[in-house]
Image (cartoon, helix red, strand yellow):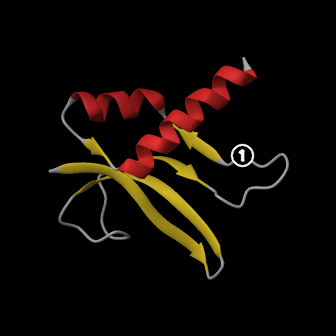
Amino acid sequence: MVVIRLARGGSKHRPFFNIVVADKRVRRDGRFIERIGFYNPIAKGGEEGLRIMQDRLTHWISVGAQPSPTVERLVKQGATAAAKAA
C-alpha cells in the first residue's frame, strides 16, 4: 500500500518534516516515491511553516494513496490558512 506521511529531518530539538509518498513497508525516513511538501513546526514570523503541492496530493489520493492522520490534519490546517489569507 502507498501512504502519504511525514519523514523527519532536521537535527536534535529542531524538527523539520518532509511530506512524502512512500510504500507502507519502508521505514519512516527511508526511501520514498515523491516529495510533495514540507512542514516546519518551529517556523517563526515570516517563515513558511507548511507547503503542500495540492495537485500532486490529489493525484496520489485519486490513485489510492492513504494519507496518515497527521497529514490529513495538516492538509485541513493548510486549507483553512489559505482561506483566511484570501
Asked whether 30 or 79 is in front, the reply is 79
Looking at this view, name the residue that lies furthest to the top: 86
Residue type indicated by callout 1: Glu
Q: Tell me: residue 27, above or below residue 67.
A: below
Q: Report the residue at 23% width, 67% height from top.
A: 26
Helix, strand or loop for disc 1: loop
Residue 51: x percent and y percent?
58, 41
* Residue 16 on image: x %, y %: 59, 64
Q: Nearer the viewer, residue 36 or 44?
A: 44
Q: Which of 84 and 65 is in front in this view?
A: 84
Measured as percent of width and height from the top left, residue 62 is found at: 24, 27
Above-or-below relation of 76 to 15: above
Q: Residue at x 28, y 35 (%)?
A: 60
In the picture provided, is 42 more to the left or to the right than 11? Answer: right
* Left or right for 57, reference 31: right
Direction bottom: furthest residue: 12
Q: How crowded is mark 1: few (under 14 residues within 10 Å), some or many (20 or more)?
A: few
Can I make out residue 55 in this image?
Answer: yes
- In the picture as drawn, the residue positioned furthest to the right comes out as 45
Position of 27 relative to 19 (above/below): below
Image quarter hosting the C terminus: top right
In the rendered picture of this protein, how many numbered marks are placed on residues?
1
Q: Is residue 34 visible?
A: no
Taking the spot 74% from the left edge, 56% from the top edge, the residue there is 43
Q: Mark 1 points at which residue?
A: 48
**In-image side of 9 versus 27 (left or right):** right
Is residue 52 rendered to the left or right of residue 12?
Answer: left
Q: Measured from the top left, where is residue 78 in percent x and y?
A: 58, 35
Residue plotted at (71% across, 61% down):
42
